[in-house]
Amino acid sequence: MATILGISAYYHDAAACLVRDGEIVAAAQEERFTRRKHDPEFPEHAIAYVLAEAGIDIKAVDYVGFYDKPLLKFERLLEQYLGVAPRGLKSFLAAMPVWLKDKLFTRTMIARALPDFDGEILFAEHHESHAASAFYPSPFAEAAVLTVDGVGEWATSSYGVGRGADLNLLAELHYPHSLGLLYSAFTYYTGFKVNSGEYKLMGLAPYGEPRYVDRILSQLVELKDDGSLKLDMRHFAYLEGLTMTSPSFDDIFDGPPRRAETPLSQREMDIAASIQVVTEEAMLRMARHVQRETGMDNLCLAGGVALNCVANGRLLREGPFKRIWIQPAAGDAGGALGVALTIHHKMLGQPRVVDGVRDSMRGSYLGPCDSDADIARALDGLGAVYQRHDSEQSLIDCAAQLLASEKVVGWHQGRMEFGPRALGGRSILGDPRSPRMQSVMNLKIKYRESFRPFAPSVLREHVAEWFELDSDSPYMLLVAAVRPERRLAPTAEQAALFGIERLNVPRSTIPAVTHVDHSARIQTVYADTNPRYHALLSRFHALTGCPVVVNTSFNVRGEPVVCSPQDSWRCFMRTEMDALVIGSFVLLKEQQTPLADDGDWRSQFELD
């Protein structure tokens, strides 16, 4: 048996993961410690954390794995720049020093950063790491595997088959033809930041009409029956590396790209709706092809596009697979997990232990956990006023009463989540029945765009009573509709509204988590993976008759999700949150001494 450290770094969402004897011990993104969103740098803090969680130092690690192959990626970049020369010279000159100084010598950099490590340093291909992160932790003994993202070394998507400890990729789609980059091009064009704003584009889509679909499919992309695609590169500029789209793209879509932070028009909403339809169709075609080729009943998904939960919901409802499992850290951070498991199962030949029902991700609660003693020391050092609850029931009663009275509650409990979603470890919670909760949380707590929807956490045993879903969705990666009997019929005046005007129209009895198309991004909550969060929802259900709460990540726009008690305190104090429930402690905003004026603190963070 072996202890394996997996690392992803240098592009975005650097992370570390520790696997010991095949068990996932700990995993975390570097951004949570450095407070730099999507931090791409070598994950020294995340590595220190996972080693500490395992109670070991680097000398006890047998293998270090890196999630992609830098030499192959460098080869692709050279071919890319040579293929468009002399265009792209500015981008080439900017990129090459970083490669020649650091990225080409990743093995040396790892050895330098971990001087006491004397084991082997191994590398997996990017999509191999994605595929391993999808299949090996899944609950399936055998499954088809589909990975879709922007680009790794050359591959932009791949599929294969996993059986037991064997995982083999069968086919790839190669750069520059990429569903992920196509979606990112529209993210850029609608004024959002590439590699972080794609979920905003997805959230904007229901406000629009898909009137540009024909233009996309006739002028930008040839989408084949098997889901593979070919982009007309005349309309894209990412080969030159300066922008995502070219001037001819503007001609197709009636004008220049929207400038960031300017008002959204109906055009952007319609463009968002259109590319979302195309993405869903591509994913459905891919899935059908993969099922035909593999004959499998189960599908595992990873890669950044697997975070498109609307497309995932359609795959579950309309696709050919009986069951779908999606890696919660589907983006590059999950590559750290994937390479570690690849070493354990493929290189070392160790078997898998498969549950058949639950996965091995531990609910994705793989990050740091703070003891009550640590929390008390932190709060005392910050001058916080708090009440300590000596019993679990007292704490849960207090938190549920706060939610039932429409208070916005910061919830810092147990181990931090691995991946981009808050799952009841580092969450901001609210009452979904409140018609004002969405706008309050967006504008006064999260400081983000008003159109952004919030997700519901729901007791697994009650999900089918409230949503058109009767399956597991533990990682908030499936979208389904609110049940018809829970919806509210619009008035004639409301029905006549268009686009963003529909934002504040109550659409169901849980309006704070119901999007304009009656959809919701669902997290199902289980007593065995998060007992305290399950107890809170159960108590809220007993008080209100509603087994659902609003759950959004504990952060503000432009800042990573909180990690430490100090992070949570600062976020709590700098927003209009009403209460903070952290460990066994409850803090009420009205009892706290306001922070000294430190200027417009939000300007410290890069808005995305």
Image (tube, rainbow, N blue to C red):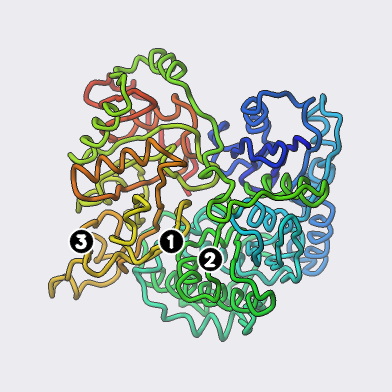
Comparing 88 with 292, the one in front is 292
* SS under mark 1: loop
Question: Which numbered marker is on residue 410?
Answer: none
The type of residue carrying mark 2 is Arg
Residue 100 visible to an observer of this rendering: no
Quadrant of the image occupied by residue 536: top left
How packed is label 3: few (under 14 Cα within 10 Å), some, or many (20 or more)? many
Question: Which residue is identified by label 1?
Answer: 471
Residue for badge 2: 323
Estimate the x, y position of residue 169 in percent, counting from the top left. Answer: 75, 65
Q: Looking at the image, which residue is at 46% across and 80% down?
A: 212
Is 29 placed left or right of 586 in the picture?
A: right
Q: Separation of disc 3 and disc 1 at Cα?
A: 26 Å
Residue type indicated by callout 1: Ser
Q: Do the numbered discs 1 and 2 sit on residues whose CB atoms are within 8 Å?
A: yes
Quote the CA–CA distance across marks 2 and 3.
33 Å
